[in-house]
Amino acid sequence: MKSIKKIISLSSSLLLMLSGCIDDDTTNNGATSFEASTPTVLSTGTEIAFNPKITVTSLTACTYDNTVNTDSKLPATTGAVECNMTVSPSGSSLTVTIENLSLFGADNLVITLNGFVDKGGDGHTDQFSVTAETGVTPTTGATSVVATGQFVGTTKPRNENVSDANVVDITGAPTKEEWDAYIVGNLIVATEDINEIEIIKFASSTAEYTEYGGSSPETGTWESYVYAKSEDDDVTGFITMTDTWTENDGSKMESKRVIQCTFTSFYLGAYKEISESEVNLTTGVEAQTSPASGTFEVYTDVSLIIDSQ
């Protein structure tokens, strides 16, 4: 059985109800893992996500958000809670101490990050291993958590193993080549609202998906897709996905979906469906569906979403 992890999205809580439908072995062209240097500081805006999400707000302060915490052993919150923070590098590890008496008591929350990874080698650190420990907290007692974590959003620590000349500017929309290098093989989490979630894993020319929002999850594969960056601006990209099949009565069917993405960075932004249609190629009858819109964020590892039990 796979249990479902709850993850916090860009600016609001994101409920991810994902079962074991995403294949972790999907071809991963460009999203190859490279060893990254250990960060010595965490810049303002850095987001540490491992359920909960911790956002750096200054050199000595952060917010702790564990609003959606079904699988988390750490204290729950309703929204983001302000905390004091200290960051201490030591060898290949980075220790982050989070101070909030009401959440963690006098023992604080001590987070140790190591095993830093740069997915795709763009010069920005994406993923890490994390150990989080507290003493006796007011709400949960002594707790120790070992997990995979990710720096989400646009502000990521610099991977010093990549030269300045080779660091990729990840702001705005990726080109087709950058899409292949940094998006293919990762998970795009698209959120229409708290009850409408879609997880898409793009391979080189196909895409697996799991949709939640109806009475039961819908899973499948788009047999082909094309990504293209807009020629009109630097923040827009289009994904056109197509699938064909044969019904039991012999009718040839085609489904087509066109999505416009507005990228804050390669790894987050907003989307809206330009069109989604299903055509009976035998009879010519076409059915349109209601276009959706929402936000998206890229996750590097399926274990950030699915816990194996």
Image (tube, helix red, strand yellow):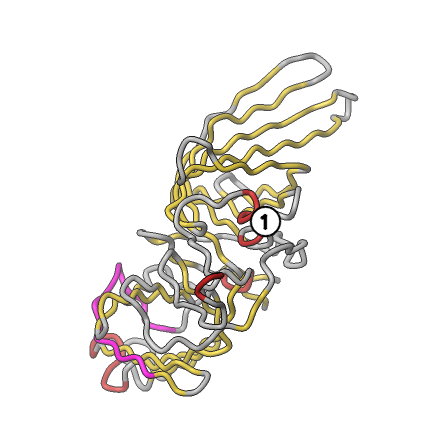
Is the residue 267 above or below the residue 294 in the image? Answer: below
Please state the horizontal and vertical placement of residue 196, each as a whole percent of the image.
44, 42
Magenta span: predominant SS is strand
Please tell me in which quadrant of the rendered image residue 270 appears: top left
Q: Position of residue 61 (x, y in %)?
A: 22, 71
Residue closest to the eye, 21 or 180? 180
**Image quadrant assignment for residue 110:** bottom left
Please name the residue shown 55% across and 60% down the image.
120
User: Residue 85 magenta-drawn?
Assistant: yes
| Residue 255 falls inside the magenta stretch | no
Q: How many marks?
A: 1
State the extent of the magenta-drawn residues as a range: 74-88
Residue 133 lies in quadrant? bottom left
Placement of 26 over or under 252, stated as above or below: below
Work out which quarter of the rendered image holds the C terminus and state it.
bottom right
Q: Is residue 39 left or right of residue 25?
A: left
Q: Position of residue 193 (x, y in %)?
A: 38, 42
Residue at which label 1 appears: 180
Vertically, is 232 above or below 61?
Answer: above
Q: Residues within 10 Å of mark 1 (few under 14, many from 20)?
A: many
The kind of residue tagged 1 is Asp
What's the residue at 27%, 65% (across, down)?
44
Image check: 22 left or right of 6?
Answer: right
- Give the residue drawn at x 67%, y 18%: 280
Determine whether 180 is above or below 289 in the image. Answer: below
Percent coordinates x, y for residue 81 in the rendering? 23, 65
On the rendered image, what quadrant is the N terminus found in? Answer: bottom right
Q: Secondary structure at mark 1?
A: helix
Which one is in front, 4 or 208?
Answer: 208
